[in-house]
Amino acid sequence: MTEVNFYDPLFVPDSKLTYSVISAKFDEKWIFVRHNKRLTWEIAGGHIEEGESSFEAAGRELMEETGAIKFNLVCIATYSVTIDGETGWGRLYIAKVFEIGPIPDISEIAEIVLSDHLPENLTHPDIQPHLFTRTVEYLTRG
């Protein structure tokens, strides 16, 4: 069973932050990405590299995975994912993208899609709906 919990954006867990995930909008549409080795869709994001802050990782991953060139980035939550008793930590960001270029050659992303809603065929269907819902709730609260 998978459990996803959310905390204040500035919450610092006892364990290391591992992931930065970015819910991104461009022209009022959500951006979703497809890894070149999968047929499923996901929210942009990835591992925080050694010496990198979660914010720096979020900006890097957004550029690498979507081709975003100009954007605003805001952390909206720290989150935990517990699977079979093992807990990992990440930060959830929202990005308003103003300009998109080509996906960089170094990217593992095959394509992006712009959508009004979360796709049905998700890479992590037990996690991503929670992250997406949290983002929509954040936007709804203003």
Image: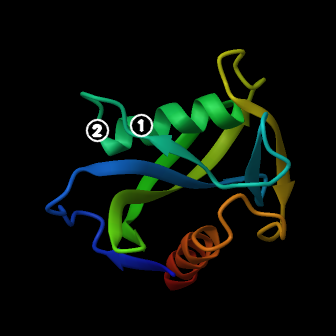
Q: Which mark is residue 57?
A: 1
Return the residue at label 2. 53
* Rendered position, 138 above or below 86: below
In what element is the residue under mark 2? loop
Residue 137: image quadrant is bottom right
Residue toward you, 47 or 53 = 47
Q: Going by the image, does 78 lie left or right of 142?
A: left
Q: Going by the image, does 138 lie left or right of 103?
A: left
Residue at the extreme left of the image, as rendered = 14
Q: Going by the image, does 140 lie left or right of 40?
A: left
Residue 69 appears in the picture as rendered? no
Q: Position of residue 28 (x, y in %)?
A: 77, 60
Residue 135: image quadrant is bottom right
Coloring scheme used: rainbow
Residue 36 appears in the picture as rendered? yes
Q: Position of residue 50 (x, y in %)?
A: 28, 29
